[in-house]
Image (cartoon, grey):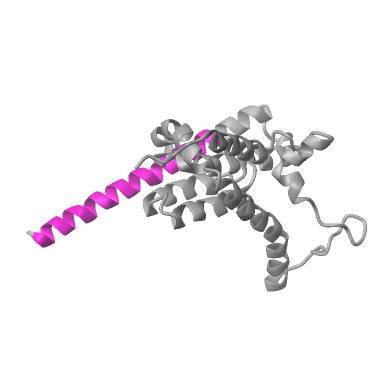
Amino acid sequence: MEKKVTWKSWLSLFFLIVMLSGLFKDVQGPLKALDFLNLTGNFGTIFEEVNFQGQGGVGAREGVLVALTILPSVVFAVGLIETLQSFGAFNAAEKLFTPILRPILGIPGSAGIAFISSFTSSDVGSVMTKELFDNGQLSDDERSVFTSYQYTASAVILNTINTQAVLLPIVVWPIGLIIVFLIVMKILGANLVRIILKISNQKELRKWKKSKA
């Protein structure tokens, strides 16, 4: 049965892509509300530029505090996804992104929103990928391929821009070319996993056929 896609689906998809793409991250005024990271906000500082996480922490205690810093963005992402999914955003994403994602990664277009969000946030991308798998929109192999894409150079645009002060003295390429190179490597790595899984599945199928013969 074909999933119904209405104007509300397209509008919610557009809204979600804009929010997760980082297009309005550095704008001023009311348009800042169209950016996911701006809406997630920041913790206040306790002393100078140090927040409740402090500095120099180690071990399990530091791990708990790191988890607490991630929690608001994950909770907000889940709420946002569930709300816009009710308007059919993922149905529209499947129709729009399938011609793109099927050839390059072998995953359905319903993963398109997670694909876009993974450019700027590894947390949101992982939450969306879990939702897609739990809802049966990604198979186990597709999840493995997509996870391998996200894991390599995670949040590629945001992290590359944020670390350019470290990169610039040692890399002669412009920042835009570095991002393009990283995205190409992410796609190549994911397709390597895709090939390995295909070969493994074929071996398992041959073993199963022999056992039934």
Dominant SS type (magenta): helix
- Up the image or down, 24 lies above or below 77; here it is above
From where the camera sits, is residue 160 visible?
Answer: yes
Q: How many marks can you see? A: 0
Q: Position of residue 150 (x, y in %)?
A: 53, 46
Q: Which residues are magenta?
A: 183-212
Residue occupying image coordinates x 92% and y 60% = 47
Question: Which of the 4 image quadrants contains residue 181?
Answer: top right
* Residue 11 lies in the magenta stretch: no
Q: Position of residue 161 (x, y in %)?
A: 71, 37
Residue 35 in the figure: left or right of residue 7: right
Residue 190 in the figure: left or right of residue 53: left
Question: Which of the 4 image quadrants contains residue 53?
Answer: bottom right
Quarter holding the N terminus is: top left
Residue placed most toward the observer, 60 or 25? 25
Tell which residue pokes out farthest to the left in this image.
Answer: 213
* Residue 201 lies in the magenta stretch: yes
